[in-house]
Amino acid sequence: MHNGHGPGLEAGQIVAVACALPVVAGYLAAARRLRGRGDAWPWGRDACFAAGGAALAAAVAGPLPGGAFTVHMAQHLLAGMVAPVLLVLARPLTLALRALRPGGPRRALLAAAHWRVSGWLLFPPVAAALDMGGLWVLYRTPLLAAAHDRPILHALVHAHVVAAGLLFTAAICQLDPVRRRWGLPLRGATLLAAGAAHAVLAKTLYALPPPGTAFAASDLHVAAQLMYYGGDLVEVALAVVLAVQWYAVAGRRRRARQVSA
């Protein structure tokens, strides 16, 4: 029976924690540097980034309860949905651009953010296709079963889940300075479509396990429900971000009309 864990997981746990800790420490150090020179940086963003790093580490190293597929699905939600929302809300690119002194590293980072390829990857429908399309391939083809006995493929699958989740969340929220900011209607419609695709996938998993696996029916049902309702909660959080942005835009327009009148 496929248990949702690949070989070499202990080494993966060490690598995950070893990567998360210095990244979070670097973020907090950069925020401290900003405040030390008198610049404002909300403490809530520090908390979001630290929580996002903790969610990523817990997805791999944390003792999660439940059956094999339920644990796998909890890892998916933490690494691919919860952590990306927290990390994106912390605006790490904005912090890096403000903390770095003028010079090569800052110019390189700004060039990457404004790169044409970055612009296309952050086009909401493209980001949604990479994220949700990847999940459909993972769970509705033999990929999940194949990754079980192949450590490199297992690591690549998890890396894609995290990267695609970050890309999708960044494309929907668009909080950091990027090449092009897409309008709220497109981002809202993309979020609705992606949410529907995620919900349908969860319902198919309730009925049929991923090809090549043999999870117990109870484990499969709990995991599918976790995917369905957990995904809904994260998508509501993204919708709240869009609603706040819409409210801010509407407020600016109203004030501009009042001034012009």
Image (spheres, helix red, strand yellow):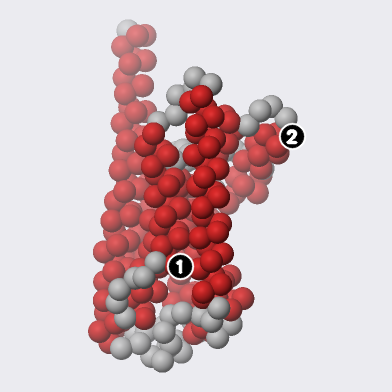
Report whether residue 193 is seen.
Answer: no
Does residue 151 sit above or below 55 in this rendering? below
Q: Secondary structure at mark 1?
A: helix
Closer to us: 193 or 217:
217
Q: Amino acid at mark 2?
A: Gly
The residue carrying mark 1 is 60
Mark 2 touches mark 1? (CB < 8 Å): no
**Residue 188 at least partly seen:** yes
For residue 177, which quarter of the picture?
top right
Image coordinates of residue 233 in percent, x first then y, are 28, 56
Q: Residue at x 40, y 31 (%)?
A: 42
Q: Quadrant of residue 111?
A: top right
**Viewer-side residue, 118 vs 33:** 33
Q: CA distance from mark 2 to mark 1?
A: 35 Å
* Amino acid of disc 1: Val
Tell me: 219 left or right of 173: left
Quarter of the figure with residue 201: bottom left
- In this figure, which residue is indicated by the disc labeled 2? 104
* Image position of 136 with respect to 31: above or below: below
Q: Secondary structure at mark 2?
A: helix
Judge from the rendering whether residue 35 lies leftward or rightward of residue 116; answer left or right.
left
- Residue at 42% across, 65% down: 59
Quarter holding the C terminus? top left
Q: Residue at x 39, y 74 (%)?
A: 72
**Looking at the image, residue 101 lies above or below residue 167:** above
Residue drawn at (36%, 79%), measured in percent from left and top?
Answer: 69
Return the residue found at the far right. Answer: 104
Dot 1 alpha-carbon crowd within 10 angstroms: few under 14, some 14 to 19, many 20 or more: many
